[in-house]
Image (tube, grey):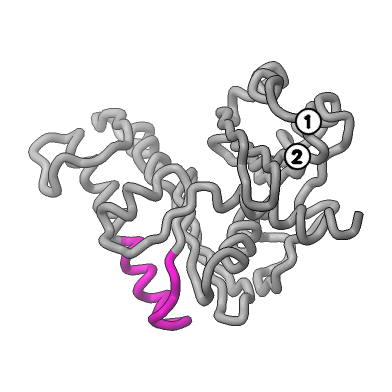
Amino acid sequence: MLLAINIGNTNISGAIFSSPKRIIKQFVLPTKAYSKTKLVKKLKKSFKISDAVICSVVPKLTKVLERDLKLFTGKRPYIIGKEVTVPIKNLYQPGQLGQDRLVNAYSACTLYQTPLVVIDSGTAITFDVVSKDKKYLGGLIIPGMEISLKSLKEKTALLPSIKLCQPKILIARDTKNSILSGVVYGYSALCKEMVIRIKKYIGKKTLVLGTGGNISLIKKYSGIKIKIDKNLTLKGINLVYVNKIKKRG
C-alpha cells in the first residue's frame, strides 16, 4: 500500500492506494493545526503501508512529516523534488516551480489528452500549461479567492469578514453580498479570459482540467467547460511512485 501525502499551504491531503488506480482511504488535515497525533488517528485503522511519498510546498512541515511517517511506517518517505524527480520535460526556471504544480502537470498529461491547462484553485489559483507533446510550458499564479476576502477585511477599516460561498446575485444591494459577488464572479471571469488566451497560444482543442478546493465555484460561474479531478495531485504522486520509484526497486 502506498501513502501519498500532499502538503499545501492550507491543507495536508493524503490517500492510500492499494493499486495504481485505486484509492481505499483519504483524509485532510489543516496545515497550521498539524500534529503527529492527528496523523496517527487518521491512519491507525489503515491497511499496512509499504511506502510513503510526500509532495510539499511547506519545507518546514516536510521535515516534520518525514520524521512522523518514518516512526509510523518504519521507513523513510520519499520526497518529490529531493530523492525523486517528476518525469516530465520542464521548461520552467529551474528551482522556482512548486512540486505540486509539476505533479499536477504530469498527472494530467498521463491520465488525459494534451494539450491541456490545469487550473488549481486553492490558496493561490495556478494555471499550468502542457503542450501537445507533453512538455510543461509554464503557467500563471494569482492570489486565491479566500486570500482576497481576507485581504479586504485586513486592509480596510469598514469592510466585513466574508465566508466564501455561492453568491446569491450578480448585482448585490448590501456590502457582504457585493464582496462575495465581486470575488466569485470576478475570479470566474478572470479564469475564463485566461483560458481563452491560453487556447489561442496552444490550440483551440486544449483540455481544461480543474482541481483544488474552490474549483467548483469557478466552473459554475465562469461558464468554462472544465473536467474536474479533485484527486489530481494525489494521483500524480502515486504515478511518480509507480513509474519512477517502484520500477527501480
The quadrant in which the N terminus is found is top right
x and y, in percent, of residue 171 in the image: 11, 47
Crowding near the residue tagged with mark 1, few <14, some 14–19, many ≥20 C-alpha atoms within 10 Å: some
Relative horizontal placement of residue 83, taking residue 12 as reference (left or right): right
Three-letter amino acid code at the position of disc 1 = Lys
**Cα distance in 3D space between marks 2 and 1:** 6 Å
Considering every residue shown, the one lying at the far right of the view is 249
**For the point 67% across and 38% down, which residue is it?**
16
Q: In the rendered image of this protein, does residue 155 appear above or below residue 225? A: above
**For the point 59% across and 51% down, which residue is it?**
233
Q: Is 205 included in the stretch rendered in magenta?
A: yes
Quadrant of residue 243 within the rendered picture: bottom right
Q: In the rendered image of this protein, does residue 178 appear above or below residue 233? A: above
Q: Is 195 included in the stretch rendered in magenta?
A: yes
Q: Cβ–Cβ below 8 Å for labels 2 and 1?
A: yes
Label 2 sits on residue: 1
Relative horizontal placement of residue 26, taking residue 18 as reference (left or right): left
Write the start and end of the magenta stretch as one range.
Answer: 190-208
Secondary structure, mark 1, is: loop
Give residue 48's mark. 1
Secondary structure, mark 2, is: loop
Crowding near the residue tagged with mark 2, few <14, some 14–19, many ≥20 C-alpha atoms within 10 Å: some
Q: Nearer the viewer, residue 118 or 125?
A: 118
